[in-house]
Amino acid sequence: MATKLSEADWKKILPGEPHMIGETELFISPVGASLLKVILGKAQESFVRLHQLGITEANFDEPKNILLIAKEFIDHMPEVIADCAGLDRDDFGKLPLPEMLRLTTTVVKVNIESKQSMEDDLSELGKYLADMKNALPEPTPPKHVPKKQHRRK
């Protein structure tokens, strides 16, 4: 049975460490945070179902779990995958199941990998910009240049 959570409960969870709400432990993996936010935003029941299938922070990105997450998307939120893949929602629904599963697992894997990569890139970019800012000399105010006067003939 799905646990209904209040808005305040969801705000406590995003983003963060494992939380106990009732008897259900909910988690956000740093690697899967953006994907899980979509799941959390779209359907609380999906998140609870994934947890009941044994998906934890430690095993979130294992191949069999990626398949379980993909199946959850296909069954309950196909529009999310269609949007991520840049497909029309109706066209996605007409794909044969193996193709749907292949496309969905690809989106899930790319999301997991790009999230970690993006965090690393942003961290590096932040360090680079901080170093650049520290290396710049103090700005000097611009000198006033008088406008040229037009002479009348």
Image (tube, rainbow, N blue to C red):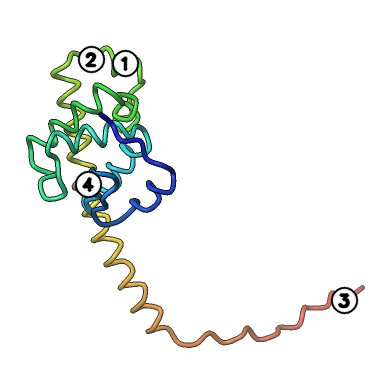
At which x and y percent is residue 43? 34, 32
At which x and y percent is residue 55? 14, 40
For residue 151, the mark is 3
- Identity of the residue drawn at 33% across and 43% down: 37
Q: Is residue 97 above or below residue 64?
A: above
Badge 4 is on which residue?
25
At which x and y percent is residue 140? 57, 87
Task: Give how far apart the Cα atoms at labels 2 and 4 are.
Answer: 35 Å
For residue 91, the mark is 1
Contact (Cβ within 8 Å) of mark 1 with mark 2: yes
Task: Give how far apart the Cα atoms at labels 1 and 2 are.
Answer: 7 Å
Label 1 element class:
helix
What's the residue type where badge 1 is placed? Asp
Which marked residue is nearer to the observer: mark 3 or mark 1?
A: 1
Badge 2 is on which residue?
95
Label 4 element class:
strand
